[in-house]
Amino acid sequence: RSCTYVEVPYPGDADGVSYMIARTMELSDAFGHVTYDIETVPASVSGGKFGYVAPMSLLTIGEKSFKSAFEGMNEKGFTASALAFSESVYEAKGGGAENLPFLNVVERLLAHCDSVDSALDYLASVRVVPLLVPFNEGIHWALADSAGRSVVVEYLQGQRVVHENGEVRVMTNDPNMQWQWRNLNTYANLNPGYPHQNDFLGVETSVGRVPRTVGHGWNLFGLPGDLSPPSRFVRMFYLRGYAMQHSPPKNASDAITLGTGLLNNVFIPRGTVAPDPRSLGDRFEYTPYGVLKCAQDRTMLVRAYRNSQWRRIDLARLDFTQAQAWPLEDGTDGVLDITADGRPASGSGAEVFF
């Protein structure tokens, strides 16, 4: 329940803007029976119009298995990301429209929609409803497309609410998006520059001039460091913003580097975020996978918990008539042994500069 989503803009083709979408997936290992893989789902399998790629979550209990997609991109570059949202109250069943369980929204939109507009039209044509079995968690969705439009869809008090997210382009979990936006005002004291504002107070003492700033990082003093949804939202907004101000990405490679750094900031090691004893099957939360994806380039990068090496899937080169699967974890830790790769170095060693 600690998923994080942030978009990183960078120069695209023909003077346009592309967005590297970075997200982490956090879910406690419910009942100790959740596994993951990455799958290509052809339109012939989903019954929709488009094939898509999605990391799949598989819950196996006894002889029964339940598979869900909380993340993905389709062949048209439309993307959907589902993040936990306990405040959700979905639509009432009935009303003459199809009842769509909320856990199936990502798969349905990826299979049938090629843009944010068409996704919103699709959601308006169905009723997004609770599950048949009691479930103590909800979901809201970040939707984005190759045209650069970005929205967040929430269901509040039984009504669908669409937030245009083209300016903020960050999402975490509870509370709702409007609360998260207002909460950014709480940290307006943060500063992108080195703190000199109190230099005019300086006086000489036996320990030197005070007050003075010693060391780096004080411009971020007060930035919340815990893993709660509001704190992660604030960190993603301000850290991305300051990075964009001083060192904006010049290309996709730069955007991958910045996106990776932001995801590293919210990575959850297993055993650090405590489970809720009131929640059935809840266990220690961790980050089973992270995703970087670009709707404009139709590329998706995935990394796992143990092996954090990014692996790229180029949707433009995939055969979407064939169902394919890749393991999320490849059984290694991703560490590359370079002992035998050394080459002769120039010079006789380090020089002394002082």
Image (cartoon, grey):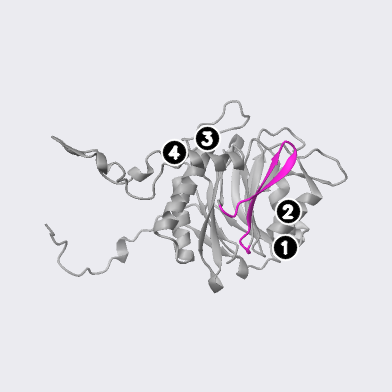
Q: Secondary structure at mark 1?
A: loop
| Dot 3 amino acid type | Phe
* Residue displayed at 11% across by 57% down: 354
| Dot 1 amino acid type | Phe
Is residue 26 rendered magenta in the image?
no
Q: Earlier in the sequence, mark 4 or mark 1?
A: 1
Is residue 165 rendered magenta in the image?
yes
What is the span of residues highlighted in magenta in the rendered image?
146-167
* Residue displayed at 42% across by 55% down: 243
Q: Earlier in the sequence, mark 2 or mark 3?
A: 2
Residue 34's quadrant in the figure? top right
Q: How far apart in space, not on screen, are marks 3 and 1 (Cα)?
A: 36 Å
Q: Earlier in the sequence, mark 3 or mark 4?
A: 4
Q: How far apart in space, not on screen, are marks 2 and 3 (Cα)?
A: 35 Å
Q: Secondary structure at mark 3?
A: loop
Q: Secondary structure at mark 4?
A: loop
- Seen in the picture, residue 192 relative to 14 is either above or below; the reply is above
Percent position (x, y) of residue 314? 58, 66
9 vs 56, left or right, is: left
Q: How far apart in space, not on screen, are marks 4 and 1 (Cα)?
A: 41 Å
| Dot 2 amino acid type | Leu
Residue 242 seen: yes
Q: Residue furthest front?
A: 200
Q: How far apart in space, not on screen, are marks 2 and 1 (Cα)?
A: 17 Å
* Residue displayed at 56% across by 29% down: 276
Q: Earlier in the sequence, mark 3 or mark 1?
A: 1
Name the residue tied to disc 3. 284
Q: Residue furthest top?
A: 278
* Quarter of the N terminus within the rendering: top right
Name the residue tied to disc 4. 224
Name the residue tied to disc 1. 50
